[in-house]
Amino acid sequence: MSPIIGTVQDALALVHDGDAVWVGGSGAGHGVPQAFIDALAARFGETGRPRDLTTVRVVGLGDFADAGFSQLALPGLARRTIGSNIGNEPRLGALVADGALESYSLPQGVLSALCRDMAAGRPGHITHVGLGTYVDPRQTGGKQNARTTEDLVELVELAGRTWLFYRALPIDVAVLRATTADEDGNLTFEREPILGDSLALAMAAHNSGGRVVVQVERLAARRSLRPADVRVPGALVDLVYVDAGQRQTYATAYSPYYSGELRAPSAAVSPQDASPPDVRKVIARRSFMEFRPGDICNLGFGISQQIGVIAAEEGVEDALTLTVEQGIFGGVPASGGDGGAGRDYQARLEQPSMFDFYDGGGLDIASLSFAQVDRSGNVNVHAFDERPRGPGGFINISARTKRLCFVGTFTAGGLRVAVEDGALTILREGRHRKFVDTVTEISFNGRLAAEKGQSVRYITERAVFELTSRGLELIEVAPGIDVEKDVLAHMDIEPAVAGTPAMMDPRLFTAGPMGLARDLTMRGAAS
């Protein structure tokens, strides 16, 4: 039976009070069926229906302002929301902070894998990911406020080990986005920046007796699509509607480089800035100095996104395989508002498969942000102010990766520094300390990392620390920095200091290329 070719209003008619509605896509508009979100918010504003929904997304959907799930911050529309990151949905986060609805924050890769487990009729997802972190039921179980009480995560013993069991979730309606649908509902994704969880989510909804709704940019005649290009078969699709103006991301209407239809010319790579680097670039450069030729890598959100640009500027992007959890394998990851996309990649994988690779320890190195670090080397990336946030893929990525760089400024809240003549000067210290006695919540467990033999470094603009059996050890300081006055005096903990810390490479603080191609070659020979 062919799906209905209808309108977004027809799609809304399939959503009833109390339904569990899963919305596909990722982050800042990547693969997001935005017209459905617009229409759902408008319909509820006009009629007060549908209400008491459970809204689910694998990745936070929003522009850190008003687009995406922020639009669904309407009291009564949802009784519960589930996702890996609510930080880019600030209006919805405010409702959660006020206790207006239940909210769970679970790891991105867990929710992605759960789509596939639900498609297969399994009772949930069993994994090591999340043990010893805030999603462990011995801590918060992923609950984000006092109103949220049901346990969705359990401890289980299997094969002589302790695991986490994430329960399967209901799914009444799945809303996806593709580029083209033919008259039978077969879907192709040729202009999309990611594939995401589309196939697994469609199967999960279909096999659960739910409905599958798809937003597309255009329609094609029956049997006119190449079978090899179809990623979701039409037999799984209940309704298709067209949004001819859909954008690749909130920031970019369309780029053939993000879709993989073209490779970017060399002129598309930003030239090296002739001025001294800012503090974020200093940190990203220092993190990149931990990378080795042939490494398969992940770059987290924020500062680490600059590493892809730095690799291109230094002419070494082909010496590494950079990946993005949304499914981009190889090439140069996008940064800023387009983070999650990439260009010149080797392959564009489905998101559950990418997380299989991460969870199994396939990464050699990852560079990820931190908000707090404590004396045990624990990292908090998701709970650092009054607004609810979430870790995204952080917990999956950090769980088994062999070498980890956690990056961030040394303090936060008004920090100002000057980078001049190969040295660093603190002009104004940040108001908030980030190296604390005990993190607010644990996103990464330092003790478990040490037991697993992971190599962990914490990189800031003025100092570099290493996780050892004694906890944190200060191993490097920036030129121009006084260890006592500029480092130790602004920590709530006392790190180990073995002799005189080494000096951070002065090239980090200078304009122009650093010559990292030669450095990579030397590190490859030494490894």
Image (cartoon, grey):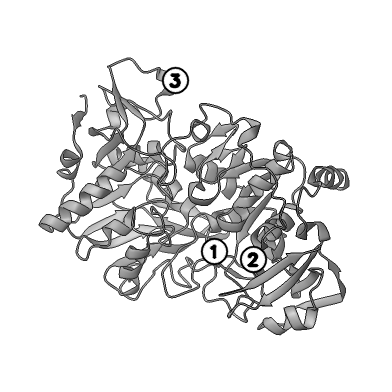
Q: Secondary structure at mark 3?
A: helix
Left or right of residue 303: residue 519: right
Residue in the foreground of this view, choosing between 476 and 415: 415
Badge nearest the viewer, 1 or 3: 3
Label 3: which residue? Answer: 228
State the residue at coordinates (23%, 62%): 74
Three-letter amino acid code at the position of disc 3:
Ala
Above-or-below relation of 522 to 495: above
- CA gap between label 2 and label 1 equals 9 Å
Which one is in front, 433 or 443?
A: 433
Kind of element beneath mark 2: helix
- Whether the residues at callouts 2 and 1 have beta carbons within 8 Å, the answer is yes
Mark closest to the chain's N terminus, 2 or 1? 1
Q: Give 54 or 246, whichever is nearer the viewer.
A: 246
In this rendering, the answer to whether 272 lies above or below 421 is above
Query: Residue 456: which quarter of the image?
Result: bottom right
In screen coordinates, is 288 left or right of 73?
A: right
User: Amino acid type of disc 1?
Assistant: Leu
Label 1 sits on residue: 131
Amino acid bearing label 2: Leu
* Image coords of residue 195 (percent x, y): 44, 37
Residue at image mark 2? 448
Give the image location of residue 17, x and y in percent: 15, 55
Q: Is residue 414 above or below residue 36?
A: below
